[in-house]
Amino acid sequence: MQSTKSKRLIQGLKKNTIGWTFILLAILGISAFYLYPMIQAFLLSLQSGMGSNLDYVGLDNYVRLFNDPTFLKALSNTMLFLIIQVPVMIVLALVFSVMLNDPTLKLRGFFRTAIFLPAVTSLVAYAVIFKYLFAQDGFINDFLINMNILSDPINFLADPFWAKITIIIAITWRWTGYNMIFYLSALQNVDKSIYEAARIDGASSIQQFFYITIPVLKPIILFTSIVSTIGTLQLFDEVMNITSGGPGNETLTISMYIYNLSFEYTPDFGYAATVSYVILLLVVVFSFIQFKVAGDRS
């Protein structure tokens, strides 16, 4: 009996050892490339200065945030992009996925590829193209004038309102197809008999969308919403290449402000680290809210 218990104990230890061996590299990688930099960034946020000439200032950098008009402007711009762009993108992705899941639709493969293609396009390349498209003498203005919609060209990139609209359009164009693929993959695993039963019971397409499609996709919608929120809070490439944060910081985002604090202005790495922790806090807060709205079971 004792021998049998000893053998089971040894076998259990071997299994645990093998299991920990498999995940050890992942733990080391996460610790080295995520946990350690996060701790170092927090310690850096308690200091001020540039290079090796850093002075400990405690929580002064965090107090400074509330009195920094540039940071508050970057925060409000980022929140505006988040509140408008993410819901629009999610809704468009849902609509496209439902349309492209219809087996009677011709050229489905072409449309799927066309909508997803922007997601694999170079960030810099597409941002530069959008910059030229929405220039005062660009294609968009020429098209609108030729269609007699406008009499004079709009300076999209120099007007605060239109510059924000341009950024929102650019982000939506790039990432809608990315989210659509997740929804489309989930819809293809749904039993077709569910929709057939709903049609027999007299449910319209809109009723099927809200009472079947949305509940089925709820976990995927939660996932894409969180990923899209994180991406928008870290928005940098489009703003940098299309408007450079202008006009007058009207499209400046938190990530671009961190870049400016580190490389454009007189470098203040401690304060830049403080601003970066704002993104972390916002990600945690919005993720928590989305989980609560979606329900714990999701």
Image (cartoon, rainbow, N blue to C red):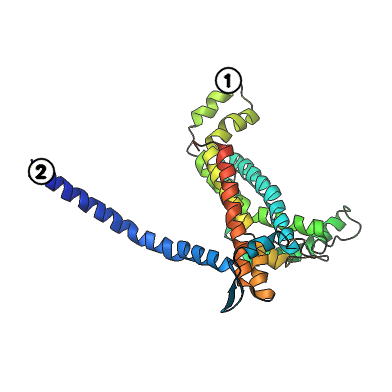
Read off the residue under disc 2: 4
Question: Is residue 193 shown above or below 240?
Answer: above
Residue 151 place in picture, x, y as percent: 91, 57
Instruction: In the rendered structure, find residue 285 and report the number of the disc placed on it.
Output: none
Where disc 2 sits, the SS reads: helix
Amino acid tagged 1: Asp
Write down the quadrant of residue 103 in the picture: top right
> Quick one: SS at disc 1?
loop
Q: Residue at x 29, y 58 (%)?
A: 21
Drawn side of residue 12 relative to residue 40, left or right: left
In the image, is residue 95 above or below residue 242?
above
Residue that protrudes farthest toward the top in the picture: 201
- Total marks shown come to 2
**Which residue appears at 76% of the width and 64% of the height?**
249
Q: Residue furthest right?
A: 151
Q: In this view of the protein, which residue sits in the foreground, 49 or 166?
A: 49
Answer with left or right where residue 202 lies relative to residue 25. right
Q: Position of residue 166 (x, y in %)?
A: 75, 58
Q: Is residue 205 visible?
A: yes
How many residues crowd mark 1 within 10 Å: few (<14), some (14–19), many (20+)? few
In depth, the one of 171 and 284 nearer the eye is 284
As rendered, which of 168 and 42 lies closer to the eye?
A: 42
Q: Which residue is mark 1?
A: 201
Q: Residue furthest bottom?
A: 52
Q: Is residue 236 visible?
A: no
Residue under the point 60% across and 56% down: 231
Q: From the viewer's perspective, is 196 left or right of 11?
A: right
Q: Quadrant of the N terminus?
A: top left
Residue type at tag 2: Thr
Please state the horizontal and vertical placement of residue 237, each as a whole percent of the image: 64, 64
x, y (%) of residue 92?
65, 44
